[in-house]
Amino acid sequence: MTISKVEVSPEEVDAGAELTLDIEVSRSDGAGPAETRLLIRDHDGELAASVELAELDGETGRSGAFVVAAPLEPGTHAWSAAAAAPGSTPAPFSFTVRAHETRVLVWDAPPSVECGETFRVKLGARCARRCRPVGWTLEVRDHEQNTLATVRLEDQVWPHTDALYYADVKLRAPDREGLYRWEARATARGLDASHAASVAALNLRVMATPECVLTVEAVDAETQAPVKGAQVVVHPYRAFTDARGVAAVKVVEGEYRVFVSGKGHVPFRSHCMVNADMTIRAPLVLDREPSDAEIWS
Amino acid sequence: MARKQGDDGNDTEVRNENRLSRRDFVTKGAVAGLGGAALAGPEGRAQARSTGTDDIAWDYDVDVVIAGGGCAGLTAAIRARDLGATVLVVDQNFDLGGRMLHSGSFVSLGGGDPVQRRDMNGESDREGFITADPVEDPAELDDSVDLLFTDLTDWSVLDRKAQSPYRYNERELVRAWAENCPATRQFLTDNYVRFARVNGTHGGGGLSRARGARCFLMLGDRTDMKAGTITAEDAGVADPERTSAFAPVQMTNMSRFVAPGAVGNGVALARPLEFSAREKGVEFMLHRSFEELVREQPVAGRILGIRARYSPRRHPETGELMQSYWQNGNVDERRETVHIRARKGVILASGGHAGNPQVRSMFYPAMREPAFPTSGLALQGQKSQDASALIAGLRVGANLAGMQQNLSYSTTFHISTRLGTRDAYTTMMPGHPTFGFRGSAGVNVGNAGFEEFIVVNQVGQRFFNEVRLPRRPGLNAYPGDGGAPGQGLEHTPQDWRNCRKEWVQEMYGHDHGLDAALAMNEGSEPPDYYSGPIWAIFDQDAVERTGWELRYPYVADNGYFFQADTIEELAEKIAAGHEFQRVPLKHLADTVATWNRHVDAGADPEFEREVDAPMNRIAAPPFYALSIMVVWHDSYGGLRVNGRQQVVDMQGEVIPGLYAGGEAVGGFNKHGLGKGHVHGYIAGTHAAGEPSA
Ligand SMILES: Cc1cc2nc3c(=O)[nH]c(=O)nc-3n(C[C@H](O)[C@H](O)[C@H](O)COP(=O)(O)OP(=O)(O)OC[C@H]3O[C@@H](n4cnc5c(N)ncnc54)[C@H](O)[C@@H]3O)c2cc1C
């Protein structure tokens, strides 16, 4: 009996995922296959699966589709299929194993920090095949690839997500002002070969110690009532107004564009030079739906 | 009424007698249209018969057949019936009202119409429902037919896109329209339609005076069109997240323009008209798509009738044939094809072509993109706005008019602020049987909401300053004090200074985001080079900032909303789950990373967003995508008609027995209902007045 065809699908498979094989056999003397069992061996000759022929009709036979687990090692794998009878000639076949794509994420980084300040960010990892990355170590590296912090992922899934595992990490800002491009990545520790992890950017804006307080009072332009929860952006500083409609933003002296917006309001915009404590009143216009008359006149 | 040909060939009377006498017809008929103009095409042609049409076995035989039971169609039907004609309306939908039922019911007429006069005199309505004071100054209501005509043919007015809304209007059509506005307002009022206070003017209705009023019903303990009341359940106001089979769109509070307890929208216009039509004996063949006109000869002779095909609309979940809210007057006909003889005339009132991507692409090739539908898709179905009148008219030799006016209307096509639904122009909640066709109501983020996300094309690339994307160009503008009700009335119509270059430069105000959205991108492939869908991409922080409710019925698992743990997964889900996403969003992850760098740098070198609004990182999981729709709302080009709404052929001759109105006709850049009702009124008048063939 000879193996006439081995169908492998998919040709590229995720590590450890299901690989479907379908094997066709034939007998050259036309007497039909006497042997009905096939053995599948991996690249080391280890037995990966054995299967009985499901369809036999005289000269040919077929295993039908059956599933084996793909190896965990990424790369091209050369396997073979042969009849179980001793001395049978094995037929080689190959396929490619891909590492699981794994994303590293960084979030909740403050929009700006003061020189030397400590701050916290969240680090997370998500395997495209939803593996639990518990025990993996993630690290933060600075712009010169120095490791600043490492953290081990526990069994904590971030709210509202499917399988994003995360941890909290404390970091210290550099002593000099600037926009730093740091990164977060998975280390080899814990991360098995079957996962290819990405690198996530962590952009850090380091500022001198602020000297001034810019107070923003957000009010509804029509009623003059305070607007709670409006976002104040004085790049790179950010804040939200409190119940009194007030946000106090500590800033370094300088010229700023101030935006106050959100909660359904048209953005209020102002330019200001800040060289002492100052207050801006931001009358916010509601972004009401245009009336038919306005839309269609 | 409609005479059905039995299988044996004998006529079977299916409805009772006409109720109006010949005398009624003569007196009422005199109101409409252009006095004295010719009624039909050249003699002789109308006598000709081809063997082809001789062979037709007519299944039904009536005086007037109307294709489409919406704004123009229902009006024409009632009018023709009032004048003594037997009338059969065929509509492809399962219920009546067309887009009128979906509409805001803002009907702009004028010329000194009864509602303008009522408000000018500070009076209430006939039933005394209105207790609110008039909204407009008497001077803003002091209108005349001549002023209305002047306004709607003013060559000098430009909008903020520098397009001319009135210059290209057909003069005869506008004159007849203006003359019939007052009578039409009265007619609608006589058919149970109640108008609130006049408030401004609706699109294309002329700037000089306030001419638009919305329709209302009063909340009460029963739904009764005669009494003018509706229950909270039927009005869709009993539950903020539920509407009813009666009102596909929840009605809105009209107390400012009427009195406490008043609610309004297209329901308060379409349902009273439908009720009246059924009461008067108009008959309706629903689930029936008009396909073809039957003319004596291919492009000569009289229009004899129509051929119409069964177009069953089935419930999106149960698959059962959907039923109209009211049934009286319905003709239950399920044969595949029927021929309906029209003894007096056929009126084409089946709407425009905004829902036919192949047709609309003649104005804007990029709008061949089928991902973007016209408004009201769920309620109306795929066959609505499919250019059926235009196609059938062209086959019998009709001419076209005002095709370029599709583009000279400032908001005909725009980017909707309602995201996460395909039917993005319209609101609808569960409770109406067609809700399942859209699956989600959508999330209206408003213009302001666009600062909360980035917008990407089908390959995941940004293409415009997001906060400018949904902005629509503003009103038409005269120099001086505005020249519009509520803004001052000082202006000189038809004055060259209105479109003087310096003035246009001053008032121009249009962002071309929509064109960027429709532009070719890496994923656009020949021969159509579709631009593909567009997506709002944001993170959990944006949800927390805004409080957007990303849950049913606002969003659903219907391919128009996605959530994922990572941006890469989000891109995969969109690619796998959206019906028009033809290519992977291969740039999305890079785009988000680049955007986050821009946010941290405080500047967006690509689209300068930092100038208009704050920028926020997209970093906090999970991540979201909501579909954004380019909406082609309505059409302005269409069949050429004269002042009697008779369709005119390419030689300038009337096609005898053929009328058209509403969005089916061209040459009149007037938005929506105001146009359709008057067209219907005129067409109904003249069709009923034709000699019986
Ligand atoms: C959400 C929304 C809000 C709107 N608000 C306003 C507003 O406030 N003011 C305003 O002036 N305008 C408004 N409009 C526009 C207005 O509703 C339309 O312009 C108007 O209804 C057009 O009238 P019509 O008679 O041409 O078409 P429709 O009213 O749409 O009626 C056409 C009818 O023909 C039927 N039909 C289509 N094809 C066929 C066929 N082949 N055979 C048989 N039947 C067919 C349809 O089912 C439909 O019932 C709005 C539209 C929408 C969607």
Image (cartoon, rainbow, N blue to C red):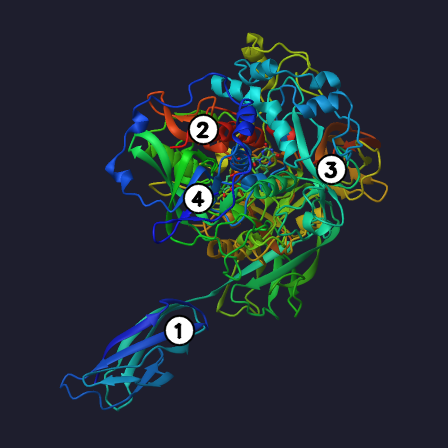
Query: Above or below — where is B87 with respect to B566?
Result: above
Looking at this view, name the residue that lies furthest to the left.
A29
- Label 1: few (<14), some (14–19) or many (≥20) C-alpha neighbours in 10 Å: many
| Residue identified by numbered label 1 | A19
Instruction: Measuring from the top left, give residue B670's x and y in whole percent.
Output: 54, 26
Residue A130 location, quadrant = bottom right
Q: What residue type is labelled 2?
A: Gly
**In the rendered image, which quarter contains the C terminus of chain B?**
top left
Residue at mark 4 shares a chain with residue at mark 2: yes
Residue topped by disc 4: B370
* Depicted B481 relative to depicted B319: above or below: above
Labels 2 and 1 in the same subunit: no
Task: Choose the circle earlier in sequence order: 4 or 2.
Answer: 4
Judging by the rendered image, the residue that carries numbered circle 2 is B637
Q: Mark 4 lies on which chain?
A: B
Mark sitting on residue B254: 3
Q: What numbered label is drawn on residue B199?
A: none
Query: Which element is circle 2 on?
Result: loop
- Write the residue at 58% across / 37% down: B466
Separation of marks 2 and 3 at Cα, in angstroms: 33 Å
Q: Residues within 10 Å of mark 3 (few under 14, many from 20)?
A: many
**In the rendered view, does B123 fall on the left or right side of B426?**
right
Residue B612 on image: x %, y %: 64, 32
Could you tell me residue B366's position as x and y percent?
42, 36
- The image quadrant that residue A170 belongs to is bottom right
Furthest residue toward right: A244
Whichever of labels 4 and 3 marks the residue nearer the N terminus, that label is 3
User: Does residue B169 lie above or below A130 as drawn?
Assistant: above
